[in-house]
Image (tube, helix red, strand yellow):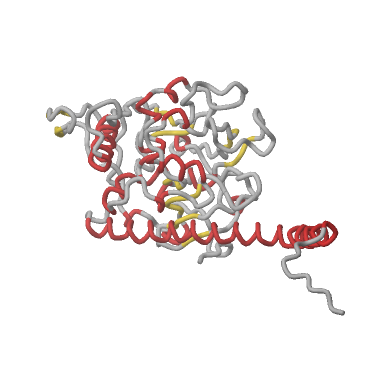
Amino acid sequence: MIEHRDGRGFSLVELLAVLAVVVGVGAVLGPSVSSMRGQMRGVSSEGNLAAIGQASGMYGADSDDRIFAFTWRGGESYTLLHNNKTVVMPHDQEAASRQVQNILQRATGRVNGAFSIRNPSSRLVHRRYSHLVLADYMGNVGESVWADPGDFLQSFWQMSPTNFDFMPYGDGMPDQPGYDDSPSWGQSSVLQMWPFGSSYQVVPHSWMSDFEDSYQPIRETPHLFTTTGGNPHLGDRLHSEVAFPSSKVLMFEEFDRERVGDPYFAYNYATPAKLMFDGSINTVRSGDARASVNPRDYHSGWKEVWEQRYVPIDMFPVPIGGLGDSDELNMRYRWTLGGLSGIDYSSEIRRIR
């Protein structure tokens, strides 16, 4: 006699056997799936940079060969949206801050009120926000093309642009020592900028002079620059000034988010994607790039390699050696000897996609 078992569920033994198989398969496939996910994010990030490179070429063609950078100038007058007043800009840095305010007010409609975009004059906006000029040209301010797919915080900030409590330093200075402790990070005009930032940074020489008065790195932090030349002229760099476009970095991922620990770009083993001036994408390790030199040394004949510690911003990846890591890193393509006329990667070692 055949016993019918319709509707009978799994026995405990059978369920445990199925779970054991699932766990075993997961253990085997887990690393492969994680690796594939990282590779897919890497390809997507390179795609972002390739699209940005195409737009950069279009911007140059429409702007008398200029590399995208802030175009408002010191000594010239501009009308501010929030009060409709025409103001003469005292210098290029203030003019750029006001241009940022103008771009973001137009893009978001936040001209007045509690969440109005304020003038971020306490910061050199060129350092993290030069891309906004190109984003404004492309019409995609604050959109996903500016975020590495592995940069979950930048993506979150883009989706929640007025939730300042979740921005770096939004709830005050971190309790743990070792983070960048500049008091100006917590200013509201700085906090509101994070959603419109980018995972990709432009090299400083794309917006400042190679050999005249310019901004320079400072020892205490890699996130702030200084100048010994008063108010140097900013912007107006040309694509034709780049001597070796395929060997010179224009933009780079600040962190190699496809690697464990999201290492800062300056670690020798990091392989962040880099947009070259010819529009190609470079994924060669940072340690294979030529050594960096502080721009202050260009004229003196002093060619000491520029190295400094990586000090994280609140909520950013920590150094490989932990907070307070004293290892000094070569800043490589961020500060190229010779500026736009210099070379980051020689033709013998670069691998371009």
Q: Position of residue 350 (x, y in %)?
A: 55, 62
Please name whichever residue, 349 or 8, is drawn nearer the observer in this view of the structure.
8
Residue lying furthest right:
1
Residue at horizontal 22 percent and vertical 26 percent from the top: 90
Please name whichever residue, 137 or 171, is drawn nearer the observer in this view of the structure.
171
Left/right placement of residue 329 relative to residue 124 reads right
Q: Position of residue 61 (x, y in %)?
A: 25, 60
Q: Position of residue 142 (x, y in %)?
A: 36, 45
Left/right placement of residue 327 relative to residue 97 reads right
Looking at the rendered image, the quarter that the N terminus falls into is: bottom right
Residue at horizontal 40 percent and vertical 34 percent from the top: 215
Count of numbered tags: 0
Q: Is residue 120 above or below residue 195?
A: above
Q: Is residue 273 above or below residue 188?
A: below
Residue lying furthest bottom:
1
Residue at horizontal 40 percent and vertical 29 percent from the top: 191
Q: Quadrant of residue 10?
A: bottom right
Residue at horizontal 32 percent and vertical 58 percent from the top: 55
Q: Is residue 289 above or below residue 100?
A: below
Left/right placement of residue 287 relative to residue 173 reads right
Q: Position of residue 342 (x, y in %)?
A: 45, 51
Q: Is residue 34 above or below residue 225?
A: below
Left/right placement of residue 303 relative to residue 3 reads left
